[in-house]
Amino acid sequence: MENFTFTAHAMAGEIDLNRLAVSLGAGRKLSWEEPLVVTPAPLEIYRGEKFASGRVYLYYFGAVVFFNCSDVDIDSFYRSIGKLSDAVRKPKDNTLTEQFSLLVDGTAGVSVSNDGAVMPACRPVYVDIISSTLAKSVALEQIETLLDSVFDRTEEIISRLERGELAVQDSQLAKTASSILNFKFRSISHIMILDKPDITWEVEEADKLYTTLANLFELRHRYNQIRHKSDTLLDINAVFTGLSHARRSARLEWVIIILIAIEIGLFLLEMVRH
């Protein structure tokens, strides 16, 4: 019986995996959905020596998953990777962290829960699937956190609107819309929530494990919530934009009216003089 741990961290942005791979001496370019797998200490490309070998999965959408790595290994990894990439930094707190365990027991059946899985044999595909799912989950969690912050800012604007105030700059509205569209783009295109890992099309066990984990971590449900919240925020932002433009148009109309009145006044004054 052996017990292995997974720890997933969310990064602040995307990771240029091919640039890292070149720095570490990788002999080929990584595909769009393929993670970069390295050893934590020393930092080098993982060659797949043993199932229990500690390794780190880096995903381009900004997630890092540690398999069978101690706290010392994790600290060593971040010290080494920091010299090669500014995008990979150890989180300051545990708010964007996922934990999972894998128990390999030849006498037990397959069992999967939110906290861990029990498997009868050591198969590398299990590690790949669990790492991929954890990476997607923690990346979604980061988007959810950022989306909630946008909701908070939007509530402040709505409160001002209720008081009859609408001092929202176009640049602020454009920035908000850009953030919302970025959330939608990252969740469906970068994290690829709706796409299964390639290995699931080749190995039936991998497909079953991924489907089970995706359901347990509610990946599709959370993606749908992000999409719904994003659509709601875009609708609200469109209302703000319409009100802002209407107010600007009203001001412009008043300026035109005042200019016409001035012109008429000057014309009448000129007539009186003559």
Image (cartoon, rainbow, N blue to C red):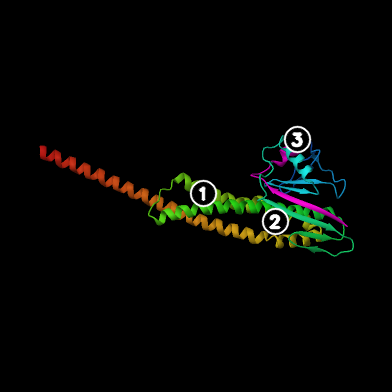
Query: How far apart, in angstroms, are the residues tagged by discs 1 and 3?
Result: 36 Å
Query: How far apart, in angstroms, are the residues tagged by discs 3 and 2?
Result: 29 Å
Q: Which residue is mark 3?
A: 23
Determine the residue positioned at 60% across, 51% down. 185
Q: Whole-percent x and y of residue 5?
A: 79, 52
Q: Nearer the viewer, residue 147 or 243?
A: 147
Element marked by disc 1: helix
Quadrant where the N terminus sits is bottom right
Q: Would residue 154 appear left or right of 190 to someone viewing this image?
A: left
Q: Is residue 187 visible?
A: yes
Element marked by disc 2: loop
Q: Is residue 188 visible?
A: no
Q: Whole-percent x and y of residue 47?
A: 84, 43
Q: Which residue is mark 1?
A: 176
For the magenta stretch, what is the residue range?
1-23
For the residues carrying marks 3 and 2, which lies nearer the camera in this image? Answer: 3
Q: Whole-percent x and y of residue 36?
A: 76, 44
Element marked by disc 3: helix
